[in-house]
Amino acid sequence: MKKSILLSAVSLALSANALAESHYHPKQGEITVPLSVFSENQSTSYKDYAFSLPENIEFFDYPDTATFIDMNVLAFYTQELLDSLNGDVTEVYAFIDKSIEFNNRALELNGVGIRRNLAGIVKLPSDFDESAVHGENNESSDTGVSYIATYLSGTADSVLQRNALDERFGSYAASYYAVFTSPSPITRIGQAQLGRNVLYTSASPNNPALSLYTFAHEIGHNDGMEHDRSEREFSYSYHMSEYGIPAVCDSKGTIMTESVEFSGMPFYSDPNHSVTSSSDLCGVSDVADVARGYREGIESGFIERKSGIMTNYRVALPKNGFASLVMDSAVNEANGTINGTVVWDGLNTDQNAFVNVVISNYGDTSPNDFNTQDVLVEYTGQTTTSFSIQLNNDSDVENDESVYFKLHAANGVSIDSTQSSSTVIITSDEVANTGSVSFTTSAITDNEGDTVTLRLERTGGDSGELTVNLDMEFDSATQSDIEFDTTSVTFLDGETSKSVTIDLLSDSIEEDAETFTVTLSGDNVGSGNQVTVTITDTTESTTPPSPTTPPSNGDAGGESGGGSIHFGILGLALMAYLRRKK
């Protein structure tokens, strides 16, 4: 089996003179201005970008394509691109994936049976000089893509480059070599060899649709489409079709339009499409009809015969067998690597196959936790191929962190959907004195209608995060007596005190004091792990006092009469005594 040459062997030191002397014939196509039509209502994330169609276009209903010509793109990206996207490799892959998808959607809208696929995604080595692609002093028409073609092929001789690319990357069966770069500091945002197979497009993080459009534009140049036929006379050495130029449609240009004022339609020129409000056509028959040029190239066998500009076409690798992913389930950060294996099943020993392993979701981690975030794995005839992801062993005290990986961009093999991803737990090698958490008191009494504050203290250490759970147990109180929805408390690194509040709800029922208990649970709980709260009732009594029973008439008369009788006897005795004295 012919082995592909590792990209690290592709590096080539180029002098300023070599760059100045290298040039291509024919002239490169390029897009040189931002596309203002995409500047509104767009996501700032490639992952979140959603495709949409213009509302004022009546699309011709092409029949579904029964078979496709698959044309593979080997994608490269720069460290500068990764840096410009905050180190997020998932954004880089979304940029590449959606560029391919944007182009495929355009071809589908044009009724073209061509499908672009990824042959693989490769991060360029550090000796690739992105400033040679779109540096501030590189406004000339051939510097950017010329440097890329020279770097990838290993030769500045444009006549030898096509064969040199096949020698280095032929096992990928790629028809195109596309480099994805960071945002361009100059007016040129993309460039391609006309009628050849090398192109580049730069990122537009604040306007993703711009860079997706640019990719479709530049790969159109590779296929021999131009901004305008006046640029040069038609020749099958340079062009696929004599009507391979753009058109104006609803005051906007189709793909291949260079002018900022007219760009924006997400398809190639096609007079079968029209403007709903005016019935104007989105192409001119026999003049501006890129869609027809592609379709005729397929129907006539122009592409598959590899004639004219299609000498670049490489038949895509047939998919045979399955690839699955196995990775370390847990690894200590001090190890420095996450080890993994791609398992190949059902492949022939002499076939070519490739698949990327890449972070699909950072989970608890961040890009700063990794020195490498993806790897392109090649099948070498064995049933397994090992690889590693390099970790950044920092000095931070961290909790265990989960990160998620997936297989992506399979070429020559299918991905086993039952084992296409892996979760890895990274443990920190820094030992933290996290301390323990306790309540500051074991009992609190308060009235219903008030708010109780529970204070927690962290003692014995304050390094790293520490989380404890709050468990509620009701004694005589019930859930309806309180309002409390906190289930856990997290102390951040360096924090030593926290508090939570519980609302004691009042009611109109007279009742005895009621209690409930809050208990701390977790790995770092101290001895003061429980507090009992007593709720006292504040409801005033509504029971009326017992009435005094009035005396009956008989009782009152008897008492009064008795008193009067005693007084009468004394009076009579006194009167008798006075008479005797006389």
Image (cartoon, rainbow, N blue to C red):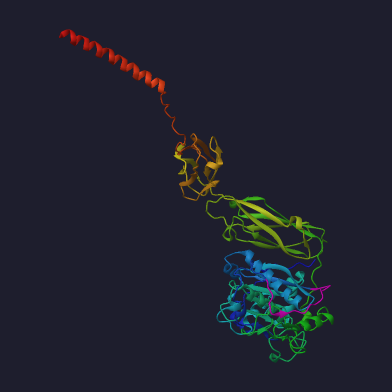
Say how many tags the image has: 0
Q: Main secondary structure of the magenta part?
A: loop
Q: Is residue 318 left or right of residue 512?
A: right
Q: In the rendered view, would you say 171 is above or below 139?
A: above
Apparent side of residue 391 relative to residue 536 in the rendered image (left or right):
right
* Image quarter hosting the C terminus: top left
Q: Is residue 61 magenta?
A: yes
Which percent across, then down, holds residue 451?
Answer: 46, 45
Report which quarter residue 120 is drawn in.
bottom right
User: For the view shown, which residue lies furthest in the top direction?
Assistant: 580
Image vertical order of residue 354 relative to residue 432, above or below: below
When the figure is inspected, residue 546 is found, relative to residue 288, above or below; the finding is above
Question: Of 279 and 158, which appears nearest the observer?
Answer: 279
Q: Is residue 90 visible?
A: yes
In the rendered image, residue 106, in percent from the top left (x then y), is placed at 73, 76
Task: Classify 464 as above or below 155.
Answer: above
Where residue 283 appears, x then y in whole percent? Answer: 73, 86
Q: Is residue 429 magenta?
A: no
Res. 191 image quadrant: bottom right
In the image, the segment drawn in magenta is: 51-69
Which residue is farthest left?
582
The front one of 390 and 5 is: 390
Instruction: Examine the image and state in which quarter residue 193 appears.
Output: bottom right
- Position in image of residue 400 (x %, y %): 59, 50
Q: Residue at x 45, y 36 (%)?
A: 541
In depth, the one of 501 and 577 nearer the eye is 577
Specify whether residue 521 is in view.
Answer: no
